[in-house]
Image: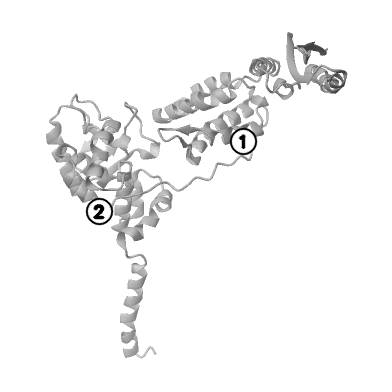
Amino acid sequence: MASIQARSGKLVVDFRYLGIRCRETTTLVDNPYNRRILKTPLDQLDAEIPLGTFEYGKYFPKSKRIEEFTAKRSLQIAVQSNVPLFHDYVEVWFTQKEIEWRMSYRQKVLIVIENYLKPAFGKQVLSKIKKSDLIDFRASLAKVTHGKNQTSLKASRINQIMTPLRMILNDAAERYGFESPYKNINNLKESRIEVTPFSLEEVQQIITTVRDDFKPYYTIRFFTGMRTSEIDGLQWKNIDLQRREIHIREALVNGVLGGTKTYGSDRTIQMNDRVYQAFLQQKSLNNGKSDFVFCNRDGGPLDYRLVNKRVWHPILRFLGLTPRRAYQTRHTAATLWLSAGENPEWIARQLGHSTTEMLFRVYSRYIPNVTRRDGSAFEAMLERLNTEEPAHEQYGFL
């Protein structure tokens, strides 16, 4: 039973919780009036402890022992309910799920678990995590900053962090028979993908000006739409010069060669003549010193960070072009193909998209800017109609 003591003129709450004696000093001055005020919450505390509803932080929000008792209480609940702590369950969950994923996605999920989910929920019993906890956690992510400029996490990144959390809680709820707290929590609305493609003239400027040993590299990037990880992980065994085909089967992520981004990313890209000639040029430059199409002096794969620092950004500065990521070479390929009137389904296959939905959603607004002929097809149809009208008059159709 809790009792009221005094220390240095302040009232102290003395009680036992989870078999441990606790003493918490209040801000109340020791006098009869304050003792009467303190008695009511202490009666409530005495009632909640045996019921198992007592929350240390609710009564003593500034206490240094909140974390200690929260962990002890979570462990106690886990033992009593047979529902594990988040920290313990997520280890099992990841081991069971990783076999379904590509290496690159495994690494992304593991980073989310270690950097975000374990620190926030690791010591909590899965069945005791509330919807409000999830909403508060998501709100806290919006305040996280990163990088040199200390920019906030984008909505897309926050959604990426929340996705494994949803999967973990839904899986645990089904396995241990409790209702998932993730019910009716929707993804944050994401901003449009940043697409700032180069014009055909700017592409030509870059290719003709860049140093000779990187001309094939950027020619192939601009005219195939390959991702950075795909071209840096590209090996000669996946190049068929006779059929003029590039087989995308692997990707280089953080220096590790593994599967592509998604299963749909495995594809065969057709070479146009410029790309074909670039591969011939690169083959002579490579001279059989590496299995990788593009390699460093030691025959190892390129480090995209070094390439960006020493080649990509310097050439943009030299030409006075707007700074942008090298990934925009992929966006440029898509917009150039669309503006040339290529079949959207063919373009989607070249890029590794399973459908044309993303193609139109991301790139379609750039077509008028490239062609300057938006609506011209319909206009041409009307012009053909006008030329046919005199013939109708001749045969008495008026």
Q: Residue 155 location, x and y as percent?
A: 50, 41
Question: Which dot marks residue 207?
Answer: none
Quadrant in the picture for residue 30: top right
Q: Residues within 10 Å of mark 1 (few under 14, many from 20)?
A: few
Residue drawn at point x = 49 percent, y = 21 percent: 95
Q: Which residue is mark 1?
A: 135
Quarter of the picture holding the C terminus: bottom left
Q: Residue 303 location, x and y as percent?
A: 28, 30
Q: Residue 97 vs residue 321: left or right?
A: right
Q: Residue 264 vs residue 271: left or right?
A: right
Report helix, strand or loop for mark 1. helix
Of callouts 1 and 2, the N-terminal one: 1
What amino acid type should be assigned to the residue bearing mark 1?
A: Ile
What amino acid type should be assigned to the residue bearing mark 2?
A: Leu
Residue drawn at point x = 15 percent, y = 32 percent: 286
Q: Residue 61 vs residue 41: left or right?
A: left
Quadrant in the picture for residue 227: top left
Q: What is the C-alpha distance between the residues marked 1 and 2? A: 46 Å
Residue drawn at point x = 39 percent, y = 56 percent: 365
Pointer 1 with pointer 2, Cβ within 8 A:
no
Q: Nearer the viewer, residue 368 or 276?
A: 368
Q: Residue 355 location, x and y as percent?
A: 41, 48
Examine the rendered structure and indicate whether residue 304 appears above or below residue 191: above
Q: Residues within 10 Å of mark 2 (few under 14, many from 20)?
A: some
Question: Which dot marks residue 200?
Answer: 2
Q: Nearer the viewer, residue 201 or 8?
A: 8
Quadrant in the picture for residue 304: top left
